[in-house]
Image (cartoon, rainbow, N blue to C red):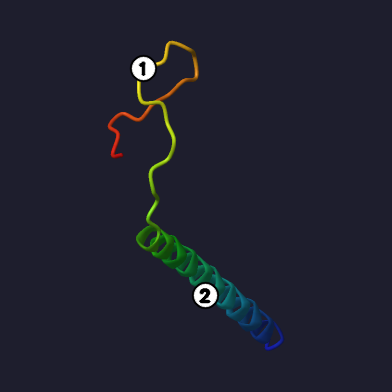
């Protein structure tokens, strides 16, 4: 019975390490998204200014430019 205890303990340890790595990746990815959202300043993009009758011709709902 003493043989199964170290094997199970090692399995639980690996599971905790895997969970910790997954959490670090998750937090790092979210931190990167917040950084990019805060640091980026998108300028005006070219878009249609008036209504278009052609399909697929979209325009901004409220132009900021």
Q: Is residue 60 above or below residue 12?
A: above
Which quadrant: the N terminus? Answer: bottom right
Residue 11 in picture, x, y percent from top left = 64, 77
Along the line of sight, the residue nearer the viewer: 25 or 1: 25
Q: Which residue is mark 2?
A: 20
Q: Is residue 9 above or below residue 59?
A: below
> Could you say which quadrant of the image residue 14 lies in?
bottom right
Along the line of sight, the residue nearer the viewer: 1 or 8: 8
Residue at (54, 71) in percent of width and height: 19
Along the line of sight, the residue nearer the viewer: 35 or 24: 35
Report helix, strand or loop for mark 2.
helix
Q: Is residue 60 above or below residue 39?
A: above
Report helix, strand or loop for mark 1.
loop
Mark 1 or 2: in front is: 1
Q: Which residue is mark 1?
A: 51
Q: How many marks?
A: 2
Distance between the alpha carbons at the discs numbered 1 and 2: 52 Å
Residue 45 in picture, x, y percent from top left = 42, 40
Residue at (28, 39) in percent of width and height: 64
Mark 1 is surrounded, within 10 Å at the Cα level, by few (under 14), some (14 to 19) or many (20 or more) other residues, namely: few
């Amino acid at each position: 019975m003493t043989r199964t205890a170290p094997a199970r303990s090692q399995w639980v340890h690996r599971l905790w390490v895997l969970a910790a790595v997954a959490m670090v990746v998750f937090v790092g990815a979210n931190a990167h998204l917040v950084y990019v959202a805060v640091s980026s300043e998108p300028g005006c993009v070219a878009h249609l200014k008036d209504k278009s009758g052609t399909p697929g011709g979209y325009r901004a709902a409220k132009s900021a430019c």
